Image (tube, rainbow, N blue to C red):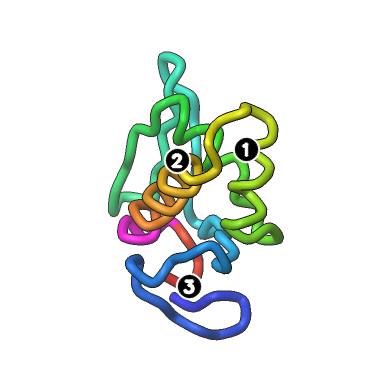
Amino acid sequence: MTEPDGITITPDQIDDGFVPTPDPAVEQAVVGGDLVLVDGWRSASVVGPLGSVIWGSFDGRCTVGQIVEDLAGATGADPEVVAHDVIGFARQMGAQGYLVGV
């Protein structure tokens, strides 16, 4: 898959400048309080509360760095810890095929 600008990257290349865009084929549902992401018949992932917040921030407009700033500001959490979590989650979702361009 390719990013909106036509570039394809590997999950480990996701950094604070990456703009996470959910693949339009990925559907989501809340089951028992957890977010479940489903990519047709190919895969499904259960996402916990923190992942749900991060996933909800992936709008195709904000960079990972902007998402980190917003979440750290809203929660008062250490920006380095938030960056680690957001980048790690984005890489995991990219590896699952849930993000455009990864």
- Residue 95's place in the image compared with 43, above or below, is below
Which residues fall within the magenta stretch?
94-98
Q: CA distance from mark 2 to mark 1?
A: 11 Å
Q: Which mark is drawn over residue 81?
A: 2
Nearer the observer, 29 or 101? 101
Q: Which mark is drawn over residue 101?
A: 3
Question: Seen in the image, is 74 located left or right of residue 94?
Answer: right
Tell me which residue sits at (49%, 78%) in the image: 2
Q: CA distance from mark 3 to mark 2?
A: 25 Å
Name the kind of residue labelled 1 in the image: Leu
Q: Earlier in the sequence, mark 3 or mark 1?
A: 1
Percent x, y of residue 17 = 57, 68
Tell me which residue sits at (33%, 39%) in the image: 45
Q: Earlier in the sequence, mark 3 or mark 2?
A: 2
Q: Is 96 in the magenta? A: yes
Q: CA distance from mark 3 to mark 1?
A: 23 Å
